[in-house]
Each structure stands twice: as C-alpha cells, then as structure tokens.
Image: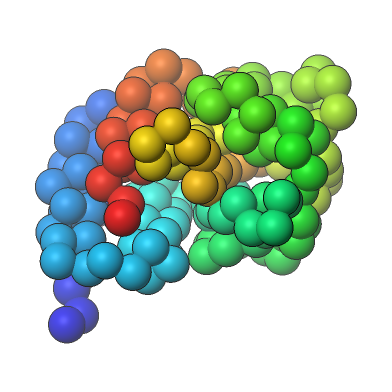
Amino acid sequence: MAKELRVKKGGKEEMYEALLPQIEGLLAGETDTIANMANVAAALKQTFDFFWTGFYAVKDGMLTLAPFQGPVACTRIGYGKGVCGAAWKEARTIIVPDVNEFPGHIACNAASRSEIAVPLIRGDKVIAVLDIDSNYCNSFDETDAKYLERICRLID
C-alpha cells in the first residue's frame, strides 16, 4: 500500500520527531530488510534532502551497496575501510564533520563534505550500515546520531 510522507519543516529534532512515527508506520508489518532499507533511505532523503542517503549490507565479508537515494556510489567497502567500514568494525556510530580530515576516507563522490555512518546491529552482529553524506561540512551531530540509531533499530 502506498503511503504519503508528511515532511515537517523546522528544527532538526522537530523534524526527526515528526518523521519517526511515520517510519514506524512504513515499516509496520514488513519483514523484508531490503524493502525497509529502501523506504527508510527515501524517507530520510525526502525529509532532510541529504546529498546521499543509503545502506551498505554486510555480504560475503564486505559492505555491499544496498538501497540508497542520491548519486551513484561505491559498490563495495572493506572491513575497517573508510567511515562505513570503521562503523562496521567498531559497531558504533561515527560522525565525520569534514571528510577530508578522516584518515582513509573513501571518496565515492567529491561533493561529499561530511558524513555519518550508523551500524544496524542484530544480536551482537553488524548486518548493515546506514550512511548519510552532506555536501556541507559539520552537517551531523549527536541529535542525528540519536535519531538515526533509533530508526536503524526499527529495521527488520
């Protein structure tokens, strides 16, 4: 069933608070992880208009490109490599205010200036990483981390 997303403008926290129950509704009853990733990526892109929003799924010992919104992206990322690989290895959210200052940053697109990577953890295992890029420095903070971690916990 098609659903329409209602985007609320305002402060970042206010926007996440309005988005969270809508994402819960989008994911309710859907058990396909790929479908849920696709809807989450679309909802985040539509709400915040981030430069790139998407997922990398752990597959055969690599992070492999999964549903996303934005320009074409790197297809595979190694364990511990770049921001996403580090989030996978460390099983924690990583916020990078300026990607040019992150050692080993993987530049899938030169327009990306800041990034946040949030692991999707099932049990004690990272199964995927939500990656969001901005074309501005210092776009992400602890507010983003808090809400994006909550959103990732909703994905089956």
Is residue 49 at all visible to an observer of this figure?
yes
Is residue 9 placed above or below 96 in the rendered structure? Answer: below
Side of 24 where 141 appears, left or right: right
Residue 20: image quadrant is: top left
Residue 155's x, y, as percent? 32, 52
Residue at coordinates 70% horizontally, 58% vertically from top-left? 60
Side of 93 where 107 appears, left or right: right
Is residue 42 at all visible to an observer of this figure?
no
Residue 21's x, y, as percent? 13, 47
Tell me the quadrant of the picture where the C terminus can be found.
bottom left
Residue at coordinates 43% horizontally, 32% vertically from top-left? 124
Residue 144: image quadrant is: top left
Residue sitting nearer the eye, 151 or 101: 151
Tell me the quadrant of the picture where the N terminus can be found.
bottom left
Residue at coordinates 51% horizontally, 39% vertically from top-left? 126
Residue 5's x, y, as percent? 22, 62
Residue 151's x, y, as percent? 31, 41
Residue at coordinates 39% horizontally, 51% vertically from top-left? 44
